Amino acid sequence: MDIGTIAKELNLKVRSASDKLDNNVTGGYTGDLLSDVMANSHEGDIWITRQVHQNIVAIATLKEHAGIILVNSCEPAKDTLEKAIQENVPILISDLPAFELTGRIYNILGKKY
């Protein structure tokens, strides 16, 4: 399933890399502790976080994540957005808290897998 489909179904707002919404999502990871995300997430994951600083882009790039979703209507910091545009990493925004968003994405992905 691609990020664009998830974005439409959950009414997510796209902040960067709108041309990468066809990135394939093979799983997901929810977490705010960067070292934990680096150690335990996988290529193709959609990363759900509350963090808004530019290090999230570095980790998403390093781990080859499909994209990042910020929860609770959080907006990326200006330098984060600039870095995401430069690295072509999709950042999307959800009004939902992490727990609810994670459950919804899990159910969406479950329909396909």
Image (cartoon, rainbow, N blue to C red):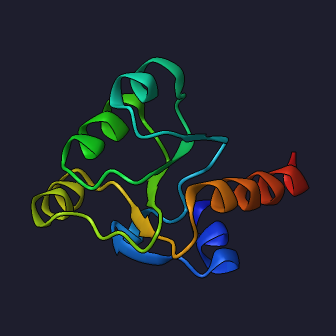
Left/right of residue 53 with respect to residue 56 in the rendered view: left
Which percent across, then down, holds residue 36? 44, 23
Which residue is farthest top?
39
Which percent across, then down, holds residue 95? 52, 76
Quadrant containing the N terminus is bottom right
Q: Residue drawn 34% across and 66% down?
A: 17
Which percent across, then down, holds residue 98? 57, 56
Left/right of residue 55 with respect to residue 31 in the rendered view: left
Which residue is farthest left?
79
Q: Residue drawn 55% across and 62% down?
A: 22
Which percent across, then down, holds residue 15? 33, 73
Q: Residue drawn 33% across and 54% down?
A: 89
Image position of 13 with respect to 58: above or below: below
- Residue 39 figure quarter: top left
- Residue 83 figure quarter: bottom left
Quadrant containing the C terminus is top right
Task: Name the foreground residue: 95 vs 2.
Answer: 95
Q: Residue drawn 17% across and 63% down?
A: 77
Task: Name the foreground residue: 82 vs 35.
Answer: 35
